[in-house]
Amino acid sequence: MAFNKGLSEKSKVDGIKTSEARSMAFYQALNEKSKIKTSEARSMAFYKGLSEKSKIKTSEARSMAFYQALNEKSKVHGDDFKNR
């Protein structure tokens, strides 16, 4: 009887340990999942930032090309578009 009671108490303790282990695993998994989402968000923000930066450079390059073309055209045709 004492042996069975001891086993019963041990299984309760093991049950608590198992339950705690499951809870810990669950919360660790949630924590890892949130880290991944945070990491993905940082990556997305980084690449969006790079994309915006490249758009600005592209826009500046187009503007420069446009004004250089106007300048070249004015040299050929004798126009001075800057002093108008």
Image (cartoon, rainbow, N blue to C red):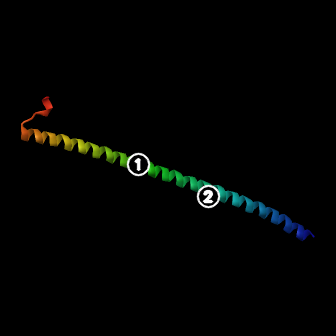
Quarter of the N terminus within the rendering: bottom right
Disc 2: which residue: 29
Q: Which residue is pictured at 62% across the width and 56% down the height?
A: 28
- Left or right: residue 55 compared with residue 84: right
Mark 1 closeness class: few <14, some 14–19, many ≥20 residues within 10 Å: few
Residue 68 image offset from top left, x and y in percent: 16, 42
Q: Is residue 40 above or below residue 4?
A: above
N-terminal label among 1 and 2: 2
Q: Look at label 2 and name its amino acid.
A: Ala
Kindly report the distance in space between the C-alpha atoms of the residues bearing marks 1 and 2. 28 Å
Residue 11's spot in the image, x, y percent? 81, 66
Give the labeled residue for mark 1.
48
The residue at 78%/63% (across/down) is: 15
Furthest residue toward top: 84
Q: Secondary structure at mark 2?
A: helix
Image quadrant holding the C terminus, namely top left
Residues 27 and 55: in front is 55
Residue 47 located left or right of residue 61: right
Residue occupying the point 50% across, 53% down? 39
